[in-house]
Image (spheres, rainbow, N blue to C red):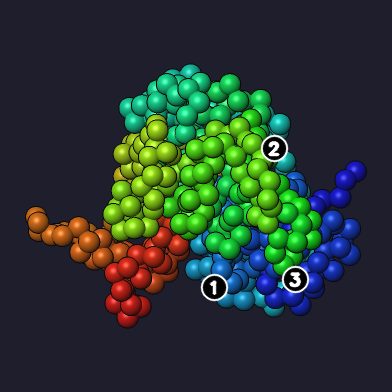
Amino acid sequence: MNKPRILVIDDDQAHREGMVVLLEDEDYQVDDAEGAETALILIKKYNYDLIITDYKMQKIDGMELLKLINDFDPLLKVIMVTGYSSIEHAVQAVHLGALDYIPKPIDPVKLKAVVSRALTVPKLESDIKEKRIAVPARYIHFGEIIGKSRGIKNVIKKINEITDIDVPVLIHGESGTGKELVARALHNESNRKDKPFIAVNTGAIPKDLISSELFGHEKGAFTGAVEAKKGKFEEADEGTLFLDEISSMSEQVQIALLRVLENNQIERVGGSHIIPVNVRIVAATNENLNDLIANGKFREDLFYRLNVYNIELPPLRERKDDILIIAEYFLDRFNREYGKQVSGIEPEAADILNKYTWPGNIRELRNIILRGMISAKGSITKKDLPAIVKQGMLPGQEIRFPAGTPLPEIERVTIIKTLQIAKGNKLKAAEMLGISRRSLYNKLEDYNIKDDEFS
């Protein structure tokens, strides 16, 4: 029997090595990473049974890493470790999909118990692992895309129109709306379906490493390049390459990507020879690229190369007919995954779900249904839903502007108000605004918004 494989992530070497030793003594196979960037590479390379990550880390913290793991594999089990052991952080971690939560300093007995419990949660049946769960016939079930709203029918129609027309596709939608699901559906319905589908969140990769990640590098190209490495373009050869958060790419990488789109050739970092590639590009963003072009932050020629065909993903608040359908889908999936028998969603709870505005879109709905399923006794009731969903938009949180207010001023005020509601939590505010945290930081800088304006 294979040993369970665990990945431990912590930028504090002593804490990280301590956990590794404790877990190896329990006869687990344990890998470790000092940061989220290395961890994401390992997660995509190996099949882990469990991830244990610290909350407070440099560059990408544990909460943001949890979101990236959810995007890559929403079924991967994650335990959060933090020295900031408050109820707020525990709830936030579970809200984002963490299976459990351990405070620092770590109690060895507690760590072993939590890990043992996490690894004994029933694994998914093979059909669930492939996310091919049966849903009632009245629902549209196109790959992993589920719903019956006019908006989602239009998305599926657009996918069908372009699957075998081998041109670049640009997907636009708020954070959490399922842009990667659309990209996968495009790939799986195309004549490239038997070839690789490679997804890259360009916003999660440090800018000094993105060129190496996409185009590969030769041995000795930079410090730490001890051997030659293929990039994502080579890995995706003859298949599909999905580039998420393309608005975060530097101009240098944008230029290199433009050359690939023009010539179907790449050159590894530190290399001198041309490598031909045959890759379909599907790109995605939650930003308005026209605004970025106007501000000199995105190349217009690259935009036109990527935007040959455009798919607009509606936010969940505009897909009211789909909210309960998707909720039932997740409930059925989680029942099977965790061996539960939650029978459904009570009418009062369903009404609350329908009225909520879902700033985090489908990702937020998924995590709330998981949390509700864990606490539910027979079916999900009002008490199993978090306060933020039950309260909806509280009095005083609405923002009104007179006609003719300049758009930059509307955006600036909206950001400040949202940060006030989120009590200064930038990750939460970014989710409410439907943008990445990196994008929020850029906007704070653009509008010169200081902490004392929302704290």
Residue 136, image x and y in percent? Answer: 50, 22
Q: Looking at the figure, which quarter contains the C terminus?
A: bottom left
Mark 2 or mark 1, earlier in chain: 1
The residue wearing badge 3 is 16
Query: Is residue 166 shown above or below 201?
Result: above
Query: Is residue 382 shown above or below 61?
Result: above
Q: Residue at 61% x, 32% y: name it.
A: 278
| Residue count near mark 2 (Cα–Cα under 10 Å), binned few <14, some 14–19, many ≥20 | some
Callout 1 amino acid: Ser
The residue wearing badge 2 is 124
Camera-side residue of 176 and 92: 176
Q: Residue furthest left?
A: 403
Mark 3 or mark 1, earlier in chain: 3
Callout 3 amino acid: Arg
The residue wearing badge 1 is 86
Q: Residue at 33% x, 77% y: name it.
A: 450
Q: Residue at 61% x, 25% y: name it.
A: 193
Q: Does residue 43 appear anywhere in the picture?
A: no
Cα distance between the residues tagged 2 and 1: 31 Å
Q: Does residue 186 appear anywhere in the picture?
A: yes
Q: Residue at 20% x, 64% y: name it.
A: 409
| Residue count near mark 3 (Cα–Cα under 10 Å), binned few <14, some 14–19, many ≥20 | some
Cα distance between the residues tagged 3 and 1: 21 Å
Query: Of discs 3 and 1, which sits in the foreground?
Result: 3
